Image: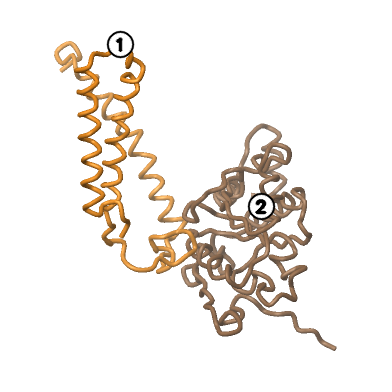
């Protein structure tokens, strides 16, 4: 069905959607985040879910205490190397489809603590991150913006075909290896299947 | 066969309808899950403990139940307090016999405490 006919029908009060659109519309408006905060960004996350910023407008007010009921992990704060295996394990325990928002400078790169020996330089070294939010800490508006970006991303996901969403592709992994505590660093220091460092060409 | 012959027929109809309303959505949800969200179970996902930490050891461990002795002793003296309070309030108006009876009661409890003490119940092992 072409867009012109659909537009014409919608003017007459008839809404025509594909099953994919209906499915994604339902999914993107009922994303349940994991109630999981690591540092000060979590305070902004709480503020975003409260009355003033009201994340409930996007259907995401139901912060779940169990990873089994959550769709979205908001990595809000500094991920220390001691905490990183737990974060990955929690992500693994979430059912598909699952998404990750890396909130704040620490979660995306280590932020102000990047030089610290005990700070992970970005959670995207171990789990696939869908939306990165810079800021220290990002304001609730930034989180809401990231959330809307995620909604757009969910909306664009395909249900069939080679580019279909990961949760519909049985070949793609749902669990990612949990790093172990090594002598000096986490082992492995990053997951090469997930994280490809940008190569600087000089 | 009409409703006049079987006055409780409508109950059966209601029951079948109610069952349908309960089971129907469940079946639909199962069908939906089967088609649109193929399960991807894994060792970590199926783990019992869901707080990010690995569970260590066996859940079938024996706990020491020593605390129950403290509990019983506490209960004993708790009840004693309840008896002592009206005793104190009515003390001036009591006969000698009543006072003696009360003292015997307290003595019995103190005796019990001494027995528990000597038996080593109060030392935490």
Report whether B125 appears left or right of A149.
left
Residue located 30% across and 46% down the image: B70
Q: Residue furthest right?
A: A202
Residue B23 falls left or right of residue A150: left
Q: Quadrant of residue B12?
A: top left
Task: Give the residue furthest to the front.
Answer: B96
Can you say whether B53 is above or below A125 in the image?
above
Residue found at x 33% / y 29%: B81
Same-subunit check for callouts 1 and 2: no
Name the residue at the bottom extreme. A202
- What numbered label is drawn on residue B93? 1
Count of all numbered marks drawn on residues in the image: 2
Crowdedness of circle 2 by 10 Å Cα count: few (<14), some, many (20+)?
some
Name the mark on residue A194: none
Identify the colour of chain B in the image.
orange
Q: At which x and y percent is residue A139?
A: 77, 51
Image quarter in which the C terminus of chain A is found: bottom right
Q: Nearer the viewer, mark 1 or mark 2?
A: 1
x and y, in percent, of residue B101 in the image: 20, 23
Question: The chain coloured brown carries which letter?
Answer: A
Cα separation, mark 1 vs mark 2, equals 80 Å
What is the chain letter for disc 1?
Answer: B
Residue B42 lies in quadrant:
bottom left
Of residues A143 and A19, the one nearer the viewer is A143
Residue placed most toward the observer, B56 or A155: B56
Query: What x and y, as percent, mark residue A147?
Result: 69, 52
Query: What residue is disc 2 on?
Result: A151
């Amino acid at each position: 069905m072409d867009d012109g006919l659909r537009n014409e029908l919608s003017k007459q009060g008839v809404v025509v959607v594909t099953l994919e659109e209906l499915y994604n519309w339902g999914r993107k408006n009922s994303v349940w985040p994991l109630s999981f905060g690591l540092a000060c960004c979590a305070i902004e996350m709480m503020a975003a879910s409260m009355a003033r910023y009201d994340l409930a407008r996007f259907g995401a007010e139901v912060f779940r205490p169990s990873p089994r009921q959550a769709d979205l992990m908001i990595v809000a704060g500094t991920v220390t190397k001691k905490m990183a295996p737990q974060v990955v394990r929690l992500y693994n325990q979430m059912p598909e489809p699952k998404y990750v928002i890396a909130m704040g400078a620490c979660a995306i790169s280590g932020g102000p603590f990047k030089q610290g020996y005990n700070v992970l330089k970005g959670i995207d070294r171990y789990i696939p991150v869908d939306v990165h939010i810079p800021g220290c800490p990002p304001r609730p508006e930034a989180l809401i913006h990231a959330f809307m970006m995620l909604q757009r991303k969910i909306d664009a996901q395909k249900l069939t075909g080679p580019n279909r969403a990961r949760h519909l592709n049985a070949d793609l992994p749902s669990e990612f290896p949990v790093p172990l505590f090594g002598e000096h660093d986490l082992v492995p220091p990053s997951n090469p299947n997930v994280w490809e460092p940008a190569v600087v060409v000089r | 066969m009409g409703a006049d012959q079987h006055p409780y027929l409508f109950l059966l109809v209601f029951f079948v309808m109610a069952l349908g309303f309960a089971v129907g959505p469940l079946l639909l949800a199962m069908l939906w899950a089967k088609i649109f969200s193929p399960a991807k179970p894994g060792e970590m996902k199926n783990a019992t403990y869901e707080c990010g930490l690995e569970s260590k050891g066996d859940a079938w461990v024996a706990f020491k139940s020593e605390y129950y002795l403290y509990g019983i002793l506490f209960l004993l003296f708790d009840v004693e307090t309840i008896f002592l309070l009206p005793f104190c309030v009515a003390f001036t108006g009591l006969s000698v016999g009543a006072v003696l009876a009360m003292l015997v009661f307290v003595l019995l409890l103190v005796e019990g405490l001494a027995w528990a003490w000597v038996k080593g119940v109060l030392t935490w092992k």
